[in-house]
Amino acid sequence: MKKFFAFALSVILLFAAGCQSTPEAGIVKGKSSDALIEKAQAEPGQGTLAQRLDAPETYESSVSSQDGKLHVTIDAAVTVPQADSVPILQITAAEITQEQADVLMEKLLQSTLHSPDQPLSKDEIAQALLLARQEQTTGPDESDEELYQVYQLEGQEVWEKALQDKIDYLTDIYEDAPEMVEPEPISGVFSDRGDGMMQIEGVNRSTDVGYEAIRIANYPSGQGFSSAFYSWNVADDGLDISYDSAQEMALYAPDTDLTQVPDVTVPEEEAQRLCDSVVQALDIPGMDLWSVRRAYSSSPLLPTRCCWEVRYTRRMNGAPITYTNDSYVSMNVTSDGSYQVPWPYESLVFYVNDDGIVGMKWLSPYEIGDTVTEDCSLLSFSDVMDVFEKMYVVDNDGEALDVTINDIRLGYARILKQDEIGVGLLVPVWDFLGSITDEEGVAYDDPDNSLLTINAVDGSIIDRSLGY
């Protein structure tokens, strides 16, 4: 049955629409990309990157804060791309093409999807009215996903008005509603949904299929809000494709007994092969496998299932864009009114179980542009470690933490280009990944959490939430 409120989508639409107009004041200056490029263009050196950087295969050290509260142990593998050069590249936000949308629908869909905008039949309206009136008596119901989010975000009073508006709307349309509605298959072609947003959206809710849906959207803001979501589930998950590792589930959903969740039995290699075929057909320059690991769906409304999480990232000139769990550059407005427009980082991930690909998220695709500098002059590995051992202690001064660094990686990160909206640079950076245990003994161990990102050209610290 068609949902009354498209709450999550509306938030995205309002957010994206708000990015189209910009304030009078200039954008946040950030760090000088011109100065960075000038420094990168100094003599880059000879030999492979590992030779130029004098980087070891492993590194061990330790450092503590003066007050003794912070302890950092480094026992890490050091990963340097097998390349002879590392250019700086300019990038902008891209859209998902019709050809790529065709690939997603051909490769992913298991059934015929129908337009979610088709009218409700009298029986569907009557059923919705019954459930809504029951909800007035019993209170907010998690199964009424959109209204429950209204309740969580806006409170009881706003929820009550929204629920009454829903009842009034359903009552008004009942008399003229058709007795039966013949499902209308989607055309698979982008259509204008208003304000320049182009979208393909389809859904199938049936006893044979369960729930299958796809949404591919391009937004007009030029700020990287283009996205594609796909889900095939036992029941309606509203394209809320949320998955966590076993460790994250133990930390954030301790009541879930993962020993009772059937393990995925399709081989890891087969899961990767399925996803590789989709990525190859999408023809995304440089897109390459990043990781394959087990993950568990974490929707509170549906049974937990185990899948292979197959993630991809770009590899440019042999060096990958290092994937981290920083999902976007946040809005930043200073006291003088200058601003920074949010821009999600590119992400492409699939979820595979014994039925095949059952989930996919592709967020904020990039358009790879000009090469800004053919090769970079980089700091030596020892210089980078000096920066880390000093700055990590400074940045976490006063914190009572035990930190273990087990992975040190050289790769690309996207930073914002100074004074330009929607334009970024791919620059070489060092990321330090590991685990943190707080003073209460709670451990946070996320392999994609960069504890510090250091610009490999000038040694400056990059805040991924700010984009520079």
Image (cartoon, helix red, strand yellow):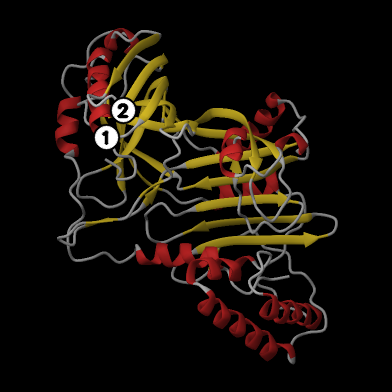
Classify mark 2: residues with Cα within 10 Å, few (<14), some (14-19) or many (20+).
Answer: some
N-terminal of the pair, mark 2 or mark 1, is: 2
Left or right: where 152 falls relative to 123: left
Which type of secondary structure does the marked residue at label 1 adopt?
Answer: loop
- Whether tag 2 and tag 1 are in contact, CB under 8 A, the answer is yes
Q: Quadrant of the C terminus?
A: top left
* Figure quadrant of residue 205: bottom right
The residue carrying mark 2 is 69
In the figure, 314 relative to 360: above or below? above
Callout 1, which amino acid? Gly
At 85% from the left edge and 59% from the top edge, which residue is drawn?
207
List x then y, in percent, for residue 41: 18, 24
Which type of secondary structure does the marked residue at label 2 adopt?
Answer: loop
Instruction: For residue 461, say whether it is visible.
Output: no
Q: Which mark is residue 345?
A: none
In the figure, 169 relative to 42: above or below? below
At 69% from the left edge and 80% from the top edge, which residue is drawn?
137
Callout 2, which amino acid? Lys
List x then y, in percent, for residue 383: 22, 16
List x then y, in percent, for residue 119: 70, 78
In the figure, 220 relative to 389: above or below? below
Classify mark 1: residues with Cα within 10 Å, few (<14), some (14-19) or many (20+).
Answer: some
Residue at the far right in the pictured view: 208
- Count of picture labels: 2
Nearest the viewer among 179 and 455 is: 455
Left or right: where 260 falls relative to 447: right
Question: Mark 2 and mark 1: span between their CA atoms?
Answer: 7 Å
Nearest the viewer among 69 and 431 is: 69
List x then y, in percent, for residue 42: 15, 21
Nearest the viewer among 349 and 147 is: 147
Left or right: where 21 falls relative to 444: left
Q: Which mark is residue 398?
A: 1
